[in-house]
Every structure is written in structure tokens, then in C-alpha cells.
Amino acid sequence: ARWTDFPIPEPGAAEIPADGDVRGVVVAGDGDYDRGALLDAAEALGFPVLATALSGLRGLGVISGYHHLLSQGVPEALRPELVIGVGSLGPSRRLDALVSAADTRIRIDHWGRSIDPDRDATHRLHADPVATLQALVGRLRAEPGWGAAWREAEDFLEMAVVELLADSTAPTGALVARALNEVPWEALVVASSLPVREVDAHLRRTGPVLANRGASGIDGFVSTALGVASLGRPTVALAGDLSLFHDCNGFLAEGDDDLVVVVVDNGGGGLFDDLPQAEHAPWYERLFVTPHGRDLSQLARLHALGYDEVAVAGETAGVVTAALAEGGRSVVRVPIDRETDRQARRALDEVGARVASSVQA
């Protein structure tokens, strides 16, 4: 078998083969667990917490910038020996690579989901993640300087990214995601493809984040966002143009909910620009990008939605905040040039690689 199941009716029975000083990390994903208690247990162990956007733990002293830090692979100074992954760990293949680089790879889920997409976990536990971590306190502790290395990398990366983006005026996916840090939403719903990846790379504020994931993650995006907004919380949904059009008839549902849909409109499937498919012209544009050629303002008019557009990146947070304050349903379109966006992602990766290479073990 490629993994071993260890059912643990009592947390002290966790048969995790590690002892003493270790380079350990907790990777926090979604799921059913006490967020504050998880942070406390990780702190007691001395393990840094790499928190995905869907964990709801961003902005609470966790590591958020791993996506760009790991752009050139896992540097030796940041390579863990033990990874404890909690819940589903999100869309980042780079984070998956970090998990795979560890000698001991533990996946824990309180709901009992079999979450091991690469099928390389050394242990899979159906257990309370907090109780499991608490049971390890006293058995394990972080290697001296290990947590400080991750914190240094996080802090230097944030300073470098802020400096890189300071003079940017053309909207990009990264700038839109970072603008959402300044918007007073109480729930954020994120579409599949580039939106969820940009949010995972750049969200820094605390709050509930939800996303439809999987092979059909694009299905029902608008309906999902309306369902979240129907709970009475001011909700922002970050959509790609295709995910919005794919379920635009969801707006036919009745309701007096407060929902602002921010649409990153790059004219189709920009995610594929970073993948090998992009080399196959001339069919690439039609078969993978699938440009829609539709006017979002007309869609908003059809469904009696508020509508606005952002021309300059620095206006995004203000426009979205104003739409949220006005209430009701609205769409904010952010037009993005695909090539500009692709170059921005590359520049951010280069910054992340430089920071990661400078970290001392």
C-alpha cells in the first residue's frame, strides 16, 4: 500500500513516527476544526502554519506567501522533514510539491475525506486535527531557527511584492486579489481557475473563503455565491469571465441579498497561458482560451444588476467597497490584458525565488 491508515479513537494513540527536534510544518486547509486551537497547538510545537486561503486563517500570524516563495521548487532552507496537512490543501501545485518533499507526510481530516491527490501520504488520519497536534506536544518540537526562517521569508517576500506592485496601474489578477484585502466583505466566494489561485497567493486578511473545486468547479458559481449571500452576510464573489457566463442564469433566483461579483475579464481562459497548450497555435485560442466576445454591461442590464468598471488598478478596492455599501446585487468588471497579467505573474515568481534563495537554514 502507498499509505497507512491509523484510526485514533484517542489522540494520544497517534502513531506518528517522529520524535525530538524536527523541521515540521502544519499546512492548514478547509474542514471542521477549531482554528484558534490549531494555531495554539502549532505554536506549542514551534511549527509554522502555512495557511491556504480556504482555511480562514489568513492574517493571523500564518505563512501566506508560499506560492511565490516556491516558484523555483523547494529551497533546502525551507524543506520540511514532517508535514501535517489539515483538510483539503487547495489549488497550489507548489504547495503539493512542498508536502511531497517531506519525509513524513500526514494528512488529517475530521470529516473522514480521503484527501491525498498525489497518493503519497505516509499516514492518513480520520481524526480531530487539533487533538492530534496537541498529542504531539512534548513528543516533537521544531528545530531551532526553523520557524524564524519561514517568518523571515514571509516578511521579506511581502516587502518585495509591495515594492514591485507599488507603481502598477494596469489591473492584474494579483492586484485585484490584493485589493480584496481592503474590502469589508464578510464572506468571499472564489471561482476556479485563475481567481482561486490569485486569492491563494495574495489574500492576507481574515475571513471565511469558499470555493467550488474539482473537475466541475466552474459549475454553479453564481448560484453558490447567491446562496452564501442569502445568509445575510455582505458577500463578494471573485469570478473569471467564463465562470460568470457559465452560470449567469443563477441571477434569475429571487432574493434581496447583498452580493458584489468582481469579474476578472481577460477575454477567456487565461490560466492556460502558463501551460504547454499555449504553444499550439492557431487552435489554442479557440479551444482553450475560448474568447466569449460578450458585453458584461448588457448581462448586468438583463438581470437588473448594478454595474461598474475599473480602469486603474488602484481604484479596485474603492469601487468594490462602494458597491457593497450600496447593497443589492451588482457586477464590477475589471478588464485585464492576458499578456500583461502573465508577465506580472512571472515577475512575482522571480521576486519569490530571490527571497527564497536568500533564506538561511
Image (spheres, rainbow, N blue to C red):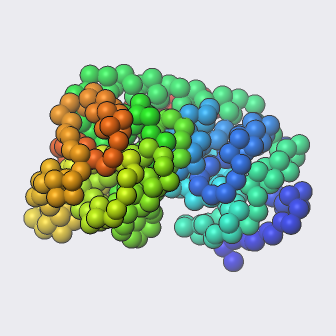
Q: Is residue 147 left or right of residue 332?
A: right
Can residue 284 be seen?
A: no
Q: In which quarter of the image is the N terminus?
A: bottom right
Image location of residue 333, percent across then percent down: 22, 44
Q: Height in image: 221 above or below 307?
A: below
Left or right: where 77 falls relative to 42: left
The vertical placement of 79 against 315, above or below, is below
Q: In this view, does 267 lie above or below 333?
A: below
Q: Which image quadrant for residue 122?
A: bottom right
Q: In which quarter of the image is residue 324?
A: top left
- Point 68% across, 66% down: residue: 111
Residue 325 in percent (x, y) is at: 36, 35
| Residue 260 percent location from the top left of the image | 33, 46
Judged from this view, the residue extending furthest toward the bottom is 1
Side (left or right) of 279 relative to 320: left
In the image, is 88 to the left or to the right of 331? right
Q: Which residue occupies the foreground of this view, 116 or 304?
A: 304
